[in-house]
Amino acid sequence: MENTEFKSGFVNIIGLPNVGKSTLMNALIGEKLSIITRKAQTTRHRILGIINEENAQIVFSDTPGFIEKPAYKMQETMNSFVTSALQDADVFLFMVELGTPIERHIKIYQKIQDNDTPILLLINKVDLSKNEEQVKKYIEEWQLILPKAETFIVSALNNFNLDSVVNRIKQLLPVGPAYYDKDAFTDKTERFFVSEIVREKILLLFKQEIPYSCEVEVESFKEEETITRISAIIYTERATQKSILIGKGGESIKKIGTLARKDMEKFLDKKVFLELFVKVKENWRNNEKDLKGFGYTE
Ligand code: GDP
Ligand code: MG
C-alpha cells in the first residue's frame, strides 16, 4: 500500500503585464512554453505547464497580464482567460515586480482576496535590487494590504527561491487524481508552439504597432523521418503592415524565418523546413469569427 496520497491541482499565475509570469512558468517546467519579451502583452493565451512527480501533479497556468482598459475584442478575450484562471485555481501565484506601487495592483488583488484559495505572493526580480531594506519594506507594505498571502521573494530569471515555492504548493494541493497524462508537460500542441515562435520573432524584430496587429497560423505541419516541414501564414491587419513585414527584397521575412526555424529545431529536436507567407485580414482583432479561428475562445 502507498502511504502517501496522490495530490493534484491547478496553480494559476496572475499579475500585471511584464512582471515575469511566463519566465516563471518556463523555469518551473524547464521548457520554453511561453514566449517572453520585454514588451507587455506578449502572452495572448492561457498556457498550461505541468510538473509530474511521483506523488503529485501540479498544473500551472500562465495567463496574459490583466489589461485595465481593453481596446480590442482580442484584449477582452485575453482578459476572459484571466477571469477563468481566477475561477479554477487551487492555489494562486500572484506575481508582482519588486518596487511597483501597490495601488497599481488593486484590480487584481480585489479579485483574489475574498475567496478561500490560498495565495502565494511572489515578489519577482529581486536580482535587480541590492538594497535589503527596500525589499523588507516592500514585503511589509504588501502584508498590510494582503494579510492572507504568504510572501516569497524570487527571481524567475535566475531560478532563485523557486524550490521553496514549489514545496509550499505541494503542501497546499488537495488530494486527487492526475488531471493530465503523467508524461505530458503541457496541454498545447506542437503546432501552437511553432506559431508562437514565429510571433516571438515578430515581437523581437518590429516596433510597437506591427507585432500587435499580427497573428500566426500554422497551415501545415508534416513530420517526415529526418525533417519536419512547416508552412505558416502571418496575418496582418493592413496592406502597409504586410509590406513592412516582408521588407525590401524580402529581407525581413527571411530574417523572421531564419530565427524562427532555429528555435523550432531546438524545440522539436529535429531539422525543420519552414515556409512563411504574409496575408492581410483586415481588422481581425475586432472580428469575432477571426478571433475564434485563431483560438481566442476557451
Ligand atoms: P509576463 O508578461 O509577466 O509574462 O513577463 P515575462 O516573463 O514575459 O518577462 C518580462 C520581462 O521581464 C522579460 O524581459 C524577462 O526577461 C524579465 N524578467 C522576468 N523575470 C525576471 C527576473 O527575475 N529578473 C529580471 N531581472 N528580469 C526578469
Ligand atoms: Mg507572459
Image (cartoon, rainbow, N blue to C red):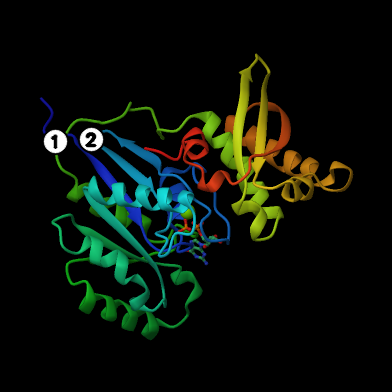
Residue 297 location, quadrant: top left
Label for residue 4?
1
For the C terminus, the image quarter is top left
Q: Name the side, left or right, on which 147 lies relative to 265.
A: left
Q: Position of residue 242 (x, y in %)?
A: 74, 45
Mark 1 and mark 2: Cα distance apart in space:
7 Å
Q: Residues at badges 1 and 2 in contact (C-beta under 8 Å)?
A: yes
Q: Position of residue 221 (x, y in %)?
A: 61, 22
Task: Indicate whether 71 appears above or below 166.
Answer: below
Indicate if the residue with disc 1 has its beta carbon within 8 Å of ligand 1. Answer: no
Label 1 vs 2, first from the N-terminus:
1
Give the residue number, with chain letter if any, for mark 2. Answer: 55
Disc 2 residue crowd, few under 14, some 14–19, many 20+, Cα 10 Å: some
Under circle 1, the secondary element is loop
Disc 1 residue crowd, few under 14, some 14–19, many 20+, Cα 10 Å: few
Residue 59 location, quadrant: top left
Q: Name the side, left or right, on which 123 lies relative to 17.
A: left
Q: Position of residue 172 (x, y in %)?
A: 18, 50
Task: Indicate whether 189 appears above or below 24.
Answer: above
For the residue pair 68 and 283, the one nearer the viewer reads as 283
Q: Residue at x 27, y 55 (%)?
A: 92
Q: Which amino acid does the dot numbered 2 rest on?
A: Asn
Q: Position of residue 156 (x, y in %)?
A: 45, 59
Q: Which amino acid does the dot numbered 1 rest on?
A: Thr
For the residue pair 187 and 81, the one nearer the viewer reads as 81
Q: Residue at x 65, y 58 (%)?
A: 209
Indicate if the residue with disc 2 has its beta carbon within 8 Å of ligand 1. Answer: no
Residue ranking furthest to the top: 225
Task: Indicate whether 76 appears above or below 133.
Answer: above
